[in-house]
Image (cartoon, rainbow, N blue to C red):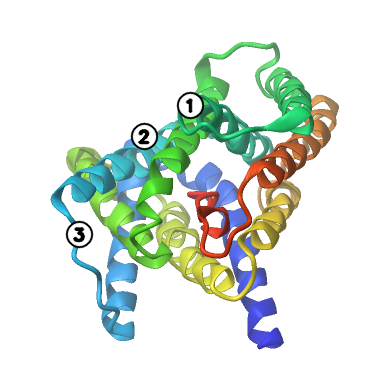
Amino acid sequence: MRGPLFVAIAVTLLTWSSAYAAIRHAVHGFPPGSLALIRFATASAVLAGYAAAARRGFPRVERRDLVRFALLGIIGVAIYHVALNAGERTVGAGAASLLVNTAPLWTALLGSLFLGERLGVSGWAGLLLAFSGAAMVSIGSAGGLRLEGDVGFVLVAALATAIYFVMQKPLLRRYGAIESTCLVIWLGTIPLFVFAPECLRAIRTATPTEIGAALYLGIAPGAIGYITWTYLLARMPASRAASLLYLVPPLAFLIGWIVLGETPGWAILAGGVPILVGVALVNAGRQAAEPRAEGSTASRPEAAPDR
């Protein structure tokens, strides 16, 4: 299984890392809401085809859980991706990936407040370190520290991801990762159809490469990346799989440089180091405080990002 596992790792990292550059290009032809719609309408169709081909039997979903899945879709798909698309109108691909990578910090704070999770000394130290790095990236991206404008949109996306993680955790005790992902994406796509008239107008004026970038976002990061991520989670510990995601921001910087010619400033690069180190400390603090009993939710993929 080693060969297929390495292929799944490579596909997951490359598709999710390339999403930021693809958004940066596609957003020139599509407004943020329209881009989210075309991306997740495509992803929904691909995942429906995958579910049919794999003949996956979806468990019966209770009505209250269906409402929760719909709310997760609104937060994790509609709000997150519209905000991220809006942010990447001016924020570079690499800087956006770093700011989105602060989501585990917000998750840890929310988990501490609402789920009774403990962080420990290293966790709180990591929070302070990572938020200082996020401030540096904000300065480098916006020309000054402010939580408004396009940098603010990216931070809203990170906060939406954190809320999504915390709300998703109880559902993952009852439903599998691929089933949860499909339900969230399908239900989260529905409210995006409010942008359908705007999207049709944008398709008529967008260039072929901008349309191709939008479709790529739905097929690769939106569907294939999640399928390979689920494959990883089924074959390796969730903590080890999650540690691979620290490679996403460096790869996003590299892809942004190759594809878009983006060169990050020193403030962004300098801020990226404490963000990654801080997130690692927070995750280590959370894992140390979580129960290690077999079948506990500590092994569940609640930290899987929504790219």
Q: Residue at x 73, y 46 (%)?
A: 253
Look at the numbered disc 1 and give the secondary structure of its residue: helix
Q: Amino acid at mark 1?
A: Val
The reply to whether dot 2 and dot 1 touch (C-beta < 8 Å) is yes
Label 1–label 3 contact, CB within 8 A:
no
Q: Nearer the viewer, mark 1 or mark 3?
A: 3
Instruction: Report x, y in % for residue 116.
Output: 52, 31
Looking at the image, residue 111 sits to the left or right of residue 191; the answer is right
Q: Residue furthest left?
A: 63
Residue denoted by label 1: 156
The residue that mark 2 highlights is 79
Outermost residue toward the front in this view: 293
Q: Which residue is mark 3?
A: 61
* Amino acid type assigned to the residue bearing label 2 in the image: Ile
Badge 1 density bin: few <14, some 14–19, many ≥20, Cα 10 Å: many
Q: Is residue 39 left or right of residue 95?
A: left
